[in-house]
């Protein structure tokens, strides 16, 4: 019998919906509650996709249909814990979520900051669903989110500090489920540097189903750093949808080093003329980790540009998939699109899949793409050895060098150092090479 | 310091390239190995440094470490470097994403540790680098660039000599360091090599032409042809080869 395209989710999801609807009834409008129910119905209708669905070909999430998760309850989080987390810097404007619930006491909103933070419950209709036909997890997020925020920058503003949104997921004996939800809106000609970090406390499993919707109004510029460093037992499904209006610019660093299974779907719609998106990605997996970097760039208007460089480092029995779609719509003349995926295999048992895809519907475009899967270069290893560097240190140094070709694109040196610190923890520590 | 006896080697599973090399190098000596293309010059240098593409099929090489002759061929490439051997590559390798500073400091500290010298911190190492950079006429900006990436031919060769200056080997093997160099770089590189030569170390220059020998006078010159040293002599042999060509050596041998 042919394997089905979807599996019916376990009944506990329905129990969770009931619990959420009951809990939210006092603070949400009837319309909002109905939107949750509708999203949940879509989720149940689609079911959990199997690998027969093209978008999930390389990533098996079927165990999410059967496994029972408890809704995440925010564990007590102290300021000391927060300050020790990756990418944390005291001077940043920091927004902390504990298991999806906003923590005003742990957040830092400097006086006079131009950033507006709106709790999603108070929004008239925060869902405004963007239909993503092959991603039922977005619907699940829209049904079950407990808390969330809209971050808005008024036109022509630039915050004095960087913004850091820290999603802390405390784990417990029973695997927990959380649905972080964040919206970001940069007004016309606003400029910001925003980091989004997903991190766990504890080493038990959690399932983290996050959505992030970003709008860049005309002329806005966003420097985004998306970091996923959940523990090695967890599952991270992130769906990020970015809409760019005329002449807006985006530079994103998409960094993934944690989770047993991580999938980040990053879609960018260049919806205004002359918009440009630059995506840099780095994923590092070892042990039996699996990562899936899924990007989709839609060139909808003329003279847009996009570039993507995704690199992956795979060790042990880890697996990775990169699927990148660049779609150039008929009217999007003068489009310039580049896409590159490079994978470095450090072990014979690691496996990388790469599926770059171009769909071009007009002639006036310049598009290039490519993918490589390779091992460390023997000649480079010998060169290092001939200078006294032993094979283990040489391997680490070359792997770090491979990663650095992506990380050096971060204009902020402190963020660069932050990600290097994570990288260094991932590789074996070696005093010679960690400078 | 280095004793090579009847050394035979080939590219893994390829035909034999070195067909019985004999050579002794002592501290304080500068040797030049000359030979036409395909004679096995570069193979000799790579085999001595432990290049993984080559296999030794016969003979022996010993390298003196702490006054004791050790079996060089039994050592891994990084162990040979730590014991004081250095190969300046004919084609220096590009290492993307690794800065010169990180690379050099890792190499320097690995060798220091192996030789029982305490490693230096980043600041002291910087001072050492600045001092050695002057020797090869390069400025500080070069230090943060990835190793050899987008370097010109001359810069790559200078970089090899900078590494040699910092790692201070007892035996330096220069594999066609003079090829592909403009006149300025040739002079700078040659002066650098000359300054680094002391009574305690030795230099083995592998070369096709006599270019570098105009700046550095070798104590011994060996002509390598078809995998064997066919003639040895003093620096006048290099001049004779330059004027009369390799065929003369072959006929004379």
Image: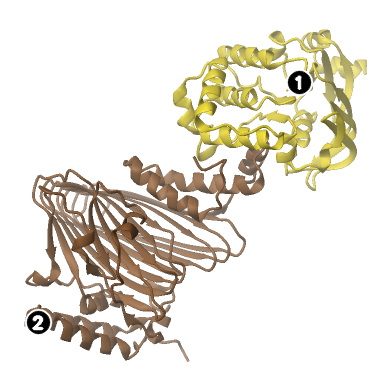
What's the mark number on residue A26?
2
Indicate left or right for A330 with B37 as reference.
Answer: left
Quadrant hosting residue A215 = bottom left
Badge 2: few (under 14), some or many (20 or more) residues near its Cα, within 10 Å? Answer: few
Indicate left or right for A367 with B18 as reference.
Answer: left
Q: Residue at x 77, y 23 (%)?
A: B36
Badge 1: few (under 14), some or many (20 or more) residues near its Cα, within 10 Å? Answer: many
Q: Are marks 1 and 2 on the same chain?
A: no
Chain whose colour in the figure is yellow: B
Indicate left or right for A73 with B233 as reference.
Answer: left
Chain whose colour in the figure is brown: A
Chain under label 1? Answer: B
Answer yes or no: is residue A191 visible: yes
In-front residue for pair B202/B41: B202
Q: Is residue B145 above or below residue A304?
A: above
Indicate left or right for B150 with B237 as reference.
Answer: left
Q: Residue at x 20, y 71 (%)?
A: A147
In-front residue for pair A251/B124: B124
Q: Which residue is mark 1?
A: B201
Answer yes or no: is residue B15 visible: no
């Amino acid at each position: 019998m042919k394997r089905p395209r979807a599996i019916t989710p376990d009944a506990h999801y329905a129990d969770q919906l009931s619990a959420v609807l009951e809990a939210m009834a006092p603070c949400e409008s009837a319309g909002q509650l109905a939107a949750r129910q509708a999203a949940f119905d879509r989720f149940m209708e689609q079911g959990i996709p199997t690998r027969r669905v093209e978008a999930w070909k390389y990533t098996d999430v079927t165990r999410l249909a059967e496994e029972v998760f408890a809704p995440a309850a925010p564990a007590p989080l102290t300021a000391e814990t927060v300050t020790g987390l990756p990418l944390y810097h005291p001077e940043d404007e920091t927004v902390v979520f504990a298991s999806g619930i906003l923590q005003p006491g742990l957040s830092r909103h400097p006086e006079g900051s131009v950033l507006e933070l709106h709790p999603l419950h108070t929004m008239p209709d925060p869902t405004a669903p963007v239909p993503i036909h092959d991603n039922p997890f977005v619907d699940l997020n829209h049904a079950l989110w407990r808390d969330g925020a809209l971050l808005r920058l008024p036109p022509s503003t630039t915050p004095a500090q960087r913004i850091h949104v820290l999603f802390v997921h405390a784990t417990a004996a029973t695997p927990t489920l959380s649905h972080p939800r964040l919206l970001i809106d940069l007004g016309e000609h606003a400029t910001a540097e925003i980091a989004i970090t997903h991190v766990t406390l504890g080493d038990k499993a959690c399932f983290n189903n996050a959505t992030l919707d970003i709008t860049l109004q005309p002329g806005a510029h966003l420097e985004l750093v998306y970091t996923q460093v959940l523990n090695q037992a967890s599952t991270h499904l992130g769906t990020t949808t970015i809409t760019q209006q005329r002449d807006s610019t985006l530079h994103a660093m998409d960094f993934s080093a944690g989770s047993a299974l991580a999938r980040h779907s990053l879609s960018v719609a260049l919806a205004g003329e002359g918009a440009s998106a630059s995506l840099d990605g780095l994923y590092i997996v070892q042990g039996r980790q699996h990562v899936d970097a899924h990007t989709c760039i839609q060139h909808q208007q003329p003279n847009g540009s996009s570039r993507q460089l995704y690199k992956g480092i795979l060790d042990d029995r880890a697996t990775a998939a990169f699927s990148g779609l660049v779609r150039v719509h008929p009217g999007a003349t003068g489009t310039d699109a580049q896409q590159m995926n490079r994978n470095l295999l450090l072990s014979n048992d690691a496996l990388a899949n790469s599926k770059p895809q171009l769909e071009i519907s007009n002639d006036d475009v310049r598009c290039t793409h490519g993918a490589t899967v390779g091992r460390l270069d023997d000649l480079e290893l010998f060169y290092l050895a001939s200078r006294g560097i032993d094979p283990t240190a040489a391997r680490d140094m070359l792997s770090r060098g491979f990663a650095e070709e992506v990380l050096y694109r971060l204009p902020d040196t402190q963020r660069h150092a932050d990600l290097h610190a994570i990288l260094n923890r991932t590789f074996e520590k070696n005093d010679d090479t960690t400078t | 310091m280095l004793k090579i006896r009847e050394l035979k080697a080939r590219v893994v599973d390829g035909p034999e390239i070195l067909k019985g090399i004999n050579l002794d190098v002592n501290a304080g000596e500068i040797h030049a190995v000359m030979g036409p293309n395909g004679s096995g010059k570069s193979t000799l240098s790579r085999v001595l440094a432990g290049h993984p593409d080559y296999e030794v099929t016969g003979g022996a090489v010993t390298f003196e470490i702490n006054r004791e002759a050790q079996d060089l061929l039994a050592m891994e490439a990084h162990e040979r470097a730590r014991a004081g051997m250095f190969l300046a590559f004919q084609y220096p390798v590009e290492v993307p994403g690794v800065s010169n500073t990180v690379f050099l400091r890792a190499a320097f500290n690995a060798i220091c540790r192996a030789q029982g010298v305490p490693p230096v911190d980043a600041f002291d190492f910087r001072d050492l680098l600045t001092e050695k950079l002057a020797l090869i006429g390069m400025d500080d900006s070069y230090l943060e660039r990835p190793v050899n990436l987008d370097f010109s031919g001359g810069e790559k060769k200078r970089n090899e000599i900078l590494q040699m200056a910092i790692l201070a080997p007892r035996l330096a093997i220069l594999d066609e360091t003079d090829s592909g160099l403009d006149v300025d770089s040739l002079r700078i590189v040659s002066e650098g090599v000359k300054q680094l030569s002391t009574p305690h170390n030795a230099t083995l220059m592998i070369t096709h032409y006599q270019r570098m020998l105009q700046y550095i006078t070798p104590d011994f010159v060996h002509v390598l042809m078809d995998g064997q040293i066919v003639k040895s002599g003093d620096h006048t042999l290099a001049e004779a080869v330059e004027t009369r060509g390799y065929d003369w050596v072959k006929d004379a041998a």
